[in-house]
Amino acid sequence: MAVRPIRLFGDPVLRSAADPIVRIDDAVRALVTDLIDTVKVPGRAGVAAPQIGVMLRAFSYNIDGDVGYVLNPELVEVRGEAQPVDEGCLSVPGFGFPRRRHPWARVVGIDLDGSAVDLSGDGLLAQALQHECDHLDGRLYIEGLEPEIKREAMRAVRQADWFARP
């Protein structure tokens, strides 16, 4: 359908928990199409529905050319000690900061047919699964930064040309 614009840091929709999908209908099918189209833009690893202004629990991913989506995802398992990895976010464009993430993660959910989806992996996929599930819970990656790095990040964000000042 369309590549949708990404909501930016400061937009209240990014701070709210998304609602579960209770019925798969044409609107949900259109959402999945938009999430897939939006994540296929080069340089994108994941897009959560709230990032395009839809408050439903869904995300798309694009890891090493493997493109897909999960509805009602739940992060059910992580493995390994959380390590700092460079992380960025489409909703905080132009920045990347070290964020602690587990090296392996597993998400379960459903697809458009209501069939079970079980997605797990390491590296960038593990990072994306954790990052997108955070979005669905109304959390941005900046919130999980170490305090000194978070102060630096917030200072940089407030100076960004895209940041909406009150």
Image (cartoon, helix red, strand yellow):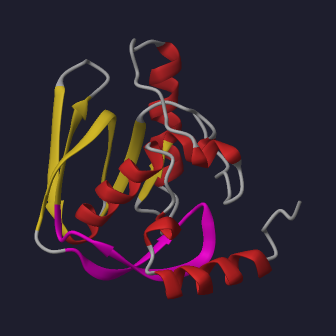
The quadrant of the image that shows the C terminus is bottom right
Q: Mostly what secondary structure, the magenta segment?
A: strand
- Kindly give the residue lying farthest to the left in the view shown: 79
Count of number-bearing discs:
0
Is residue 15 visible to us here? yes
Percent coordinates x, y for residue 23 in the rendering:
39, 11
Magenta span contains residue 109: no
Query: Bounds of the magenta span?
Result: 82-104
Taking the spot 38% from the left edge, 59% from the top edge, the residue there is 131
Quadrant of the rendered image containing residue 80: bottom left
> In the image, is residue 31 above or below residue 124?
above
Is 15 on the left-hand or right-hand side of 110? right
Q: Position of residue 136 (x, y in %)?
A: 44, 43
Reply yes or no: does residue 93 show up in magenta.
yes
At horizontal 44% and vertical 44% (from top left) the residue drawn is 137
Q: Which residue is at the front of the view, 71 or 55?
A: 55
Closest to the observer: 98 or 7?
98
- Quadrant including the N terminus: top right
Front one among 166 and 110: 166
In the image, what residue occupies the spot 32% across and 23% down? 112
* Residue 110 spot, x, y in % from top left: 25, 28
Residue 93, placed above or below residue 74 = below
Left or right relative to 39: residue 1: right
Q: Residue 117, percent across and down?
A: 18, 34
Q: Residue at x 41, y 52 (%)?
A: 134
Residue 66 found in image quarter: bottom left
Q: Is residue 126 above or below residue 30?
A: below
